[in-house]
Amino acid sequence: MATYKIALLPGDGTGPEVLREGVKVVGAAAQRFGFTLDTTEYDFGGDRYLKTGEVLPDSAIEEFRGYDAIFLGAIGHPDVKPGILEKGILLRVRFELDQYINLRPVKLYPGVETPIKNKGPEDIDFAVVRENSADMYTGLGGIQRKGTPYEVAIQEMVYSRNEVDRCLRYAFEYTRKRNKKKTLTLCGKTNVLTYVFDLWERAFHEMGEKDYPDIKRDYAHVDATTMWMVKNPEWFDVIVTGNMFGDIITDLGAMIQGGMGIAAGGNINPEGVSMFEPIGGSAPKYTGMNIINPLACIFAGQMMLDHLGETDAAKCVERACVAFLQSGVLPGLSAKEIQECGLSTTKIGDMIADYAARV
Ligand code: IPM
Ligand code: MN
């Protein structure tokens, strides 16, 4: 029987609450499909930092390299200055484990409400392949003459050909494997960022022409992309973009698929250790109330199973979520709505785990 070693990083706020349910549902699928998860929990996050001053020791990074995957709850603590935990844990793991792809499916499930008028599940089903290792996130730049009227701040958008190529390679392969519209849209800003997106555009067409003649290539500026995502989301199949633009457009993507309560993502190193997470954040005001929606984390678990090659179990988790969403017990995905209808984070996890054992 296959056993997968999983590092659990519950993190801050509601992270531990949603991760518990993610593990529960993934565990139910594992039991049904005949494999096991050997989990180890790490308590990195705001509380540990406030108590000990330690964010993430080098030894933890080395340990993470020995796992089959990492499953993350949320990072971000109201008493810790913004940036310390995000950069020190989330971004550090992404960078050090070279998780150079951030895969974010944008899929509207039946039974989930979208704020976009006249659009349904048949219209909203695409994925964003966000480059996850470079761009303005590298920290190249600095501040000079700080605090004076002559202060200058620089934060540069940096891409090497290799970073662009490996991201494009993943995106083309993913589009082919997805096998839907077989269309890959490059999202950039070639009309203004004439260096960085010139590189992206050339690499995109060179690779597409040479190795992916079966994949249709399309291009959209990032501002227009946000417009089309709202106006005609059905046009998209897979969008590939840089780290910064990907960060922005995937929050919009999360909203059109029903909100942060349902959006999941994978930080993927196709040759190494990947990390799966709900993309919503730590929702500090709901901490400990057992009313935060665990669906995003459960979908992250589905992505993790798929990545581990347990595709039947992954599909089962998705069917279980759909069965739950269509059962109509949940009036909406927000913590408030969960509380009002008398459900809870734990109960939702129980119900989906129960579906996972039989649907
Ligand atoms: C995300 C988040 C992170 C990012 C933050 C928390 C550093 O917004 O995963 O999208 O910018 O990548
Ligand atoms: Mn973001």
Image: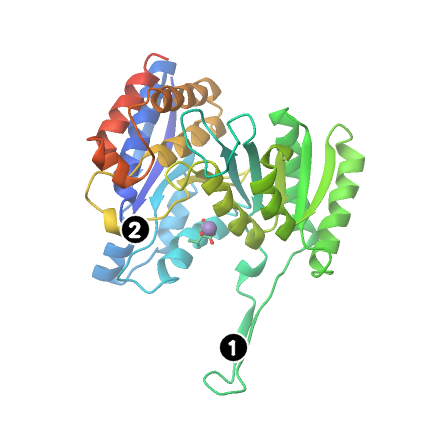
Q: Quadrant of residue 147?
A: bottom left
Residue found at x 52% / y 77%? 143
Seen from the viewer's position, the closer of residues 70 and 168 is 168
Residue found at x 36% / y 24%? 325
**Residue type, label 1:** Ile
Residue 338, disc: none
Residue found at x 76% / y 40%? 207
Picture layout, residue 220 above or below residue 350: below
Image coordinates of residue 82 in percent, x first then y, are 36, 62
Q: Mark 2 sits on what residue?
A: 44
Q: 10 Å neighbourhood of mark 1: few (<14), some, or many (≥20)? A: few
Image coordinates of residue 244 in percent, x first then y, are 55, 55
Image coordinates of residue 120 in percent, x first then y, are 51, 28
**Residue type, label 2:** Phe
Q: Quadrant of residue 344?
A: top left
Image coordinates of residue 153 in percent, x first then y, are 54, 75
Q: Mark 1 sits on what residue?
A: 143
Residue found at x 61% / y 37%? 232
Picture layout, residue 239 above or below residue 59: above
In the image, taking residue 146 as reference, residue 331 lies left or right, namely: left
